[in-house]
Image (tube, rainbow, N blue to C red):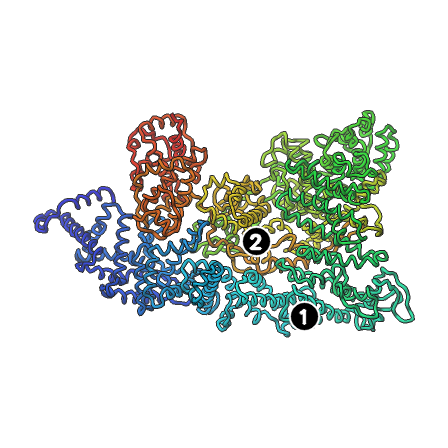
Amino acid sequence: MNEEEEEEEQRDEEEPMDTEEQIRETASEGADTIARLQRKRALEGARFVREKLESDSSLLDVDGIIRSCLHGATAMLKDAVREDGATLRKAHRLQLLLKHLQGGADRGGKPNLMTVIRRRLTLLLKDKEETAMTAAMASRWLSNDAASFEAICRAGTFRRALWQYLETRVTPLLAGIIAFADTNDNLDILEDDASDDWVVSMWLDMLSDTNITLLKYKDLQTATQRKELTEFEVKTTGAYGRFFQGQLPFSWVIKEQTDHLIYVANQDAQRDARSMAENALNASALGKVLERAASVAEGGRRSIISRYIADFAQMVYRCYSENPDAEYKLVIEDIVYALRCSFLQQQQRRSVSRTDEDEEEDEEATFVDESSYLDSSFPHIHLVHESIRRRLALFSELVQLWPESVDRLAAVEMKMPLDLKCLLLMLEAWLIPTKPELENVNTRQKWIDKNRLAAPVVLRLLESVADVTPEHVYHRDKCRFFWNRIGAVQLFIEHVCPSDVADIARSIQWCWSLWTLLGDRTDFKAVQSFDKVEAFFHMCNKKASELFFGKQDNCPVCDKTVQFPVKLPCDHAICRHCLVELQETNNCSCPKEQCYKKFPRDFKGKSVTAQKDGEEKFALYKQQCNAFFMEVVSRFCFSDNILPEEAVVRKLMAYVTRRPRRGESQVPGRGAQAEAMLRTKKMFEESLDPTPVVRSFLLQLLLQVDIESVRKYLGEYFEDTLGFLSSDPTQTVELCILCVQCFEDHHRRQSALCDSETRCIDFATRLLRASLDLLRRDQPAVNIGTVEAVASVRFGLVETALWMHRLYIAGDVDRTLTTEVRRLIEAARAICDQDQFKWPRVYLMRQVARRHGMDALKRLSEFQSWIVPVYARVNKNDAVPDCFVICGDEYKKLRELFAEVSIGKNLGPLEEALKSLNCAPEVGESVALLAMYREITSANVHEDAQRRPSAEAVNMLKEFCNTCPTFKNKAFARAVAGNSLGGNLCVKPRRVAIDRDVSEVVTHFKILLMNSPNNGLQGLWVELATAPQNMQNSFLPTMPQDDLDDIRTAIGQGIVAGETPAFYQCKNGHPYVIGNCGRPVAAGTCLQCGAPVGGTAYRLQADNQALAANVDNTRWGHILGQPLKRAPVPERQMSAAATAVVRVLLHMSMYLGSLENPQAISQMLYPPVNFAEVSQFLWNHIIVDVDTIHNAVGHSRDDVLVFLHILIDHMIHNAKQVAGLDLRLLTKQSRAQWENTYVDAYIAQGLNGLDAKIQGANNLMVNDNRLGNNPLLRTIFESDAPSTFAGKIHEEPSLWRFRSHITLEHLAHALDENLAQKRGGEQEQMKAGQKKFPILRLFLKEEHQLRAIRMLPNILHLHRLLLQRLNRCIDSSEATTMTVNDFLSSITDENQRQELLSLVNDFSYAWDCVRPSLPNHPFGGCTIPPEYAQEPLTTESRLAMLLPSLRGWGLCSVGLVYYLQELQNNFLENYSIEFKQILQARVDIYDASHAHLVSYHPVHDLQPIILANCNYSLEVGKGTTIEYNFGSMERQLVERFIRGRPRLGIGSQMAFIKYREDFTNASMFDQLRNRIPQEPLPSPADLERDLKHKPTEVTDLLASIDIAVGFLVSIGGDPEMKLTRFMSDTLKMKQTQTVLFSCRLKHVESLWLMLSYLRARMQASYGHEAFEKVDEKYREPIPEDMQKKLHLAFQHVQMNMFLILLYECIIFKISVKQNTNDEDYADNSEYSLKDVLVLYMSDSKSNCSIPALEDDRFPADVKVKHCIATWLYALSPNRR
């Protein structure tokens, strides 16, 4: 309606009405007069209708209007098709409404349905007039259309037209009321419970009260355009949209309000949430209705509670079975059971806290009504459900696994939690196998698959069952025993009897035997079950012997059938364990009568040719037994880090020592020692393989949980061995080595638990000092104290080597740690200086040299001369190994000749030697250049000029290079001779060792490129090194890339005719594809985050968007940024190690290019690098690459440099050319092709057999004739011959060898080696190998990040604890300035502080694992800025990093959660593709436990699997040899950590921190005004005066008001109630501030605004941020000319009032975020601030009036974007 029409209507309404006679007299004036008459009648009718709708007058048939609208209203309702097919709801609803809307009389003075609907219609009409109409429209809405000529003609009469128009306006409102009232079939309660008057009364009271059932006119409009709805959906609040019929009126309203009250109450961590929520609910309008209903209900409150629990279960639990009624009945019973348990626990706590006096008073009250729990409050029900929510989810998973469990549970009468009851039933009736099931291969595999499917749920459930009652414990243990039994048999089948085993007969016989032998009480923490496994092994051995070796004669030793026969040199056969027995007793002669032929003590036994196949099968059988035994021990004996009983520990220790327990009986007739060892020996020799792996594995497990038992047992063992130590020390020394290594690893784990570097250093220092005292004592030759002391010394010296290197060489030790480090060094020196201790000093030297390099050892000896003994000290420059000796004997010959030239000898012999080289010309030139570099160029490192080559010798060599035909590149040869290679390649005195070593590698690489053709495989490096200007726009190798374009291409290759797939992205930025026509026809969820994707009817989801075609974010050039430490990460088809090696070659070639053309190289770097720093930038990258390779292959930095020399030498000897390669790499595809070709040609072969290659190179350097007699090198590289045991055990050399650790990096490298091996030189076979072990490869590729997933539950728990403490209690500026340590220090409870510190450490661990990848992964439309991801998280970091938020530093916390969720989902998707497995349903991250996650501890969980599938040996001079069983390892990884894991989703809204300024915003106070009308404070000036200089009181008051507002928004209240009364009586919050005494609930908004304003002024005066949440676009500074205008304007303005008005406008209007997708969205930052303020003053919400703003004195060119600067300028005392 335009303004003219409104004015005309206003005039018509104001002028007096003419009578009908007057109008008839002027009828001739035409149709306008008739229309005027009609309009007047309509106005009169409209007024009449409004009055009668509001009254109960019978002059207007209001009830008739409602009834006439009823059919139309019900027709506007939309009912979804239900799962039960109930599509006739609309007709049933109409019949029900017609029945209850008959007549208008009240029910005995009580309101009926008609009365309530009439009231709600009236309120909706008023709301419509107030919110959706102007004042003129509100008074004439009925007459505008009803009195039109067309309406009257259409209706026939004016009265009918008026009636019809009224129906059209009332019908949609009535439809909205009915749709709301019939949620969850709520109307049926009126019909079903007609006999229960209290239910109907409660129903009508709740609908009638607008404080309970909130229904506004805006709820009946569209969300954006605010048009009246023409169709209303009748909703359900059942879980996951399931329909159900409610039993309690408006139960969903009760649930929503209760949830909100609990949420608000939880914000105050100092008070009991339950009592606060209960008090608030009781004081609310809803509480009063419930109280009235309880007072008249037949069962009282219990009737209401029982009905509510039935509805509550439907709203919180999702049913999956085909019998939902039975399933919901079970859930209801479980909630009731949980309430009962909670009630009993409360009673127990009260009885414990009751005094003696109370007990005397309550003596008579001995009986407690067990049904009292039904008197629970609604908040109590919700809180109890929260405590069992995860268990109900587990029950739901069990039902999905075994649907028939619902029907079976209905017949079970057992008082226990529902999930535990279901698990027990499932184990007994579904998972326990039968004999036929285990004896058939197919059915047995199905049984295993069933167990695998159930395993994740069973494990989660067993972890979650609490020790509430003894019955719970009993049934939980019973389930655990069943599961242990099932798991043991399953492990045996998988390890010893897999489905592909050739001897299938043995598996059929043995599986059922094991099942029956274990029995019902299978507990591997008890010795009985362990003995049964041992007995089972012995039983199987006899059968295995016959199976592998055939039927044998009796053994002459044991007089039983020979088992696992071995033949003595005399060809007599005996049992294998009998041979060991004879050797242990030193009875090495054939036991056969009349033979007695001697045999060596180390004789291993002979195998006849016919038995070769049996021997191989026997070896495989023992490996399988090893794997089974170790997994049983790790999974069951030490589960939950709970120690097994002592007998089990002693038995395991017997396996470690291969000796029996003390006190074991001995069989007469045999040697005492042999009989005592028999049983343990038989176990190892027959069933288990006694490798160091198994024994160290067991010892490691024991040390983790019970170190004292280990000490005690080993002490007993060593006492027993003293008698025969001198005759046969081998086994004891072996055990000592094993114990030393395990104790050392134990110390390392203990050190890792220290929370600071200071404590780590102190821990190592204490161990060294304690060990010195032990080693000095006069003790037996072998004792546990000495063995442990050796381990402690080894650990302490490793730490000493590390900290000495950091202190003296790296220089990265904090000054505060210097004293502690020096104490550690002193403790180490005290041991090394002992004359009787030779080996500790040797071990320290080995640690320094092997881990940090020989140069580090030499430099450290300059600071601490005691490190290197006198006999091993050499000149610091003479002990540098020559890495070039790997080039062969011709190199060494030329090196000697160049050395002679350098001291003045003639060139003749050198020239002759060069002519006689027997190799390719390019190889000869390379060898000659390296020899000259080593002897001539490298000599310039000496500070003494006499040791450097003379100028005459250098000039002579330069001339020789010009004439010698061997040197093709004369200039380069002269540069080598003259030490003028440029940059860091020039040799200078006092160079850092790493620079010297790297310069040797780069020079070696440059020599390779000098002789490489431009069109060969090295052509890429040649171009980068010599002509980098030609490589602009090249996609350099190993650089990261955007893979979306590759995905497009792959999909495009599979397109069939007619398909046009299209790419889109969800609201969180994750891409997805729609096939066929490419347009959305169905909705779905994002696989990454669970957000809605797709669409319907060819319309895309509103928050999704199409991805532009051919958009690729991959950059060309070098994009790694600064040379920071990085983990080995694979790229494309290259392994992590191969990627690191190719990358170091790239950086070396770019470095060489920077010496030739630095400008061209600098143009290839992104982010840009200062032109003068390009060369050093790339040099630092080379050093980082060396460390990355070190981490990837598990070798020291020195070894890595040796490997690079080996690789370059190999490439010199094997130049290759491959046709068809684009060496310019102008596309990503050409880069990938080049990478694959290059890695296949060189890198894969170089990495294959790396350990042997490096060991061989080290041997060459040690045996070099120049250094061969160097005792230091021979000591470092363990060239001394092994010694025999004599004297004390700590003097045994083998205990002090350098030990290589089995690590994940070593495993990954070994797998890469395995897959890269070529057989017969066929490329196809190698490529086929890449497809082997796909999950193991993927796991190792991503392991450095996957290890962080286990921290997800702890991170979310940290979020919950932080939100409970800080939600609405802290400002964002405080969170940014406060450190984590500040926050932790503020917590007084020590337990809570330690818990939070532990969770913060878990967050930090996960953050460090993944933060380099976070900036590249969007979430929720946000990304983490790169500068945020570079920040490590420590206790000195900003607290805001931990607080989840979608702005500022809170992005770190949210982004980490999203990334971990996406990380698991991506990994599981790849697993499902490789293994063709269907993933389980998505689980919300808040419901996920560790059993839902790909969760593992790198040491505790992965180490046992790695150790169980590897075999290693340690020998002097041969290094460490390790072999892995990759197939078994992959299978165990899948079973333990991957199978059954679901995808994760963030289905429920993620919990974000609500800062104080976020919570009390415009929308919150809009809700408050809807509940309680607001008025201004009566005396704001007094309040401001009282609080002006009290920042602490202002902050505390704001926190209290925030909590009060949260409750008032939910429950409302009497506007005249005093605020202090509400806070003290309802919320039980003590308030002593006198400033609140005059405030009432109607003043809350004004009070909050004043307090917030005062706080902002204080913040600004302190120089802090006053408007934290306001967007940056409103922070633009004011220009100087504008400040002058403002200065003049402020002279006419009351400043305090202006500051309040502007602050209020910023908080309540300007800063309110708008949806940019709305049609009416407009950027208000360019609006005039004056206009906005004037408009805000005209709003009824504002209490300020400043006339000066309405004239021209206030500058109009001040924009909204200047609002904050204007406020601060107005506040500033210096503005004049």
Question: Are the residues at dot 2 and dot 1 in contact (C-beta closer than 8 Å)?
Answer: no
- Reply above or below: 173 against 107: above
- In the image, residue 360 sits, relative to residue 1724, either above or below, namely below
Report whether 564 appears left or right of 909.
left
Instruction: Name the residue tied to disc 2.
Output: 1464
Determine the secondary structure under disc 1. helix
Q: Nearer the viewer, residue 918 or 1481?
A: 1481
Task: Please rate how many residues cluster around mark 2, counting C-alpha atoms within 10 Å: few if below 14, some from 14 to 19, many from 20.
Answer: many
- The part of the image, by quadrant, that contains residue 1675 is top left
Type of amino acid under label 2? Gln
Q: Secondary structure at mark 2?
A: helix
Q: Nearer the viewer, mark 2 or mark 1?
A: 1
**752 to the left or right of 279:** right
Pick out the residue farthest to the bottom: 436
Q: Quadrant of the N terminus?
A: top left
Q: Residue 176: x and y, percent?
A: 31, 57
Foreground pick, 346 / 62: 346
Q: Which mark is residue 111?
A: none
Q: Is residue 662 left or right of residue 1263?
A: left
**Mark count:** 2
Residue 514's disc is 1
Q: Quadrant of the C terminus?
A: top left
Q: Residue furthest right?
A: 594
Circle 1 packing at 10 Å, graded few (<14), some (14-19), many (20+), is many
Q: Tell me: 521 left or right of 951.
A: left
Name the foreground residue: 252 vs 1168: 252
Give the amino acid at mark 1.
Leu
- Is residue 1674 visible in the rendered image? The answer is yes
Q: Earlier in the sequence, mark 2 or mark 1?
A: 1
Give the x, y percent position of residue 980.
Answer: 74, 29
Q: Position of residue 123 (x, y in %)?
A: 27, 53
Q: Position of residue 420 (x, y in %)?
A: 53, 66
